[in-house]
Image (tube, rainbow, N blue to C red):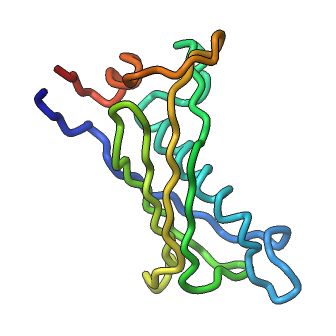
Amino acid sequence: MSKQIPRVTKTTTQLQIPFHDVDAMRVAWHGHYFKYFEIARMQFLQKIGYDYPQMLQSNCFWPVIDCHCRFIRPITYGMEICIETTLAEFEIRLRFDYLIKNAETGERLSEGYTIQVAIDAETKELYLESPQTLLDCLGVTLG
């Protein structure tokens, strides 16, 4: 099997932390980090043309089956953050790696990953390989 590199492997998303995401100490609640990952992943998928509407058109759901976040430094109210999203795996499953940095200083704030698998939208059966629609959007052929 020859391995190809997708035409897009990394995107960068910038966000400003809103007041409703922080606690009394003005620190972003830990659960919101996964929301930031989701926003960055959505922008990655939009960039390659395989956003959630295209997934549904291809009769495919992509549930998250594993996620991890390591908190390095606190993210605080009003902070501009930069989320680097890297597609680490695309055969059989999707693995996205995330690095959250302070947009002003470049300081590492958090890192993590999410893993998704493809399932048939009607039967809920697991796909044993990535759907062709995804591979087409990535600009790769397997085989």
Q: Find residue 66 and report its horizontal and vertical position in percent.
A: 56, 50
Dividing the picture into quadrants, the one containing residue 29 is: bottom right
Outermost right residue? 24
Query: Which residue is at 43% across, 46% downward?
Result: 95
In-front residue for pair 106/65: 65
Query: Which residue is at 73% across, 65% downward?
Result: 31
Question: Where does the N terminus fall, quadrant-wise?
Answer: top left
Q: Find residue 104 and report its horizontal and vertical position in percent.
A: 49, 82
In this view, 109 is above or below 136: below
In-front residue for pair 90/37: 90
Query: Which residue is at 59% across, 42% downward?
Result: 64
Outermost left residue? 2
Question: Where does the C terminus fall, quadrant-wise?
Answer: top left
In this view, 6 is above or below 50: below
In-front residue for pair 66/139: 66
In-front residue for pair 107/141: 141
Query: Which residue is at 58% across, 78% downward?
Result: 71
Q: Find residue 49 and report its horizontal and vertical position in percent.
A: 45, 28
In this view, 37 is above or below 75: above
Q: Find residue 18 and report its horizontal and vertical position in percent.
A: 77, 69
* Number of callouts: 0
Q: Answer with left or right where residue 33 lies relative to residue 96.
A: right
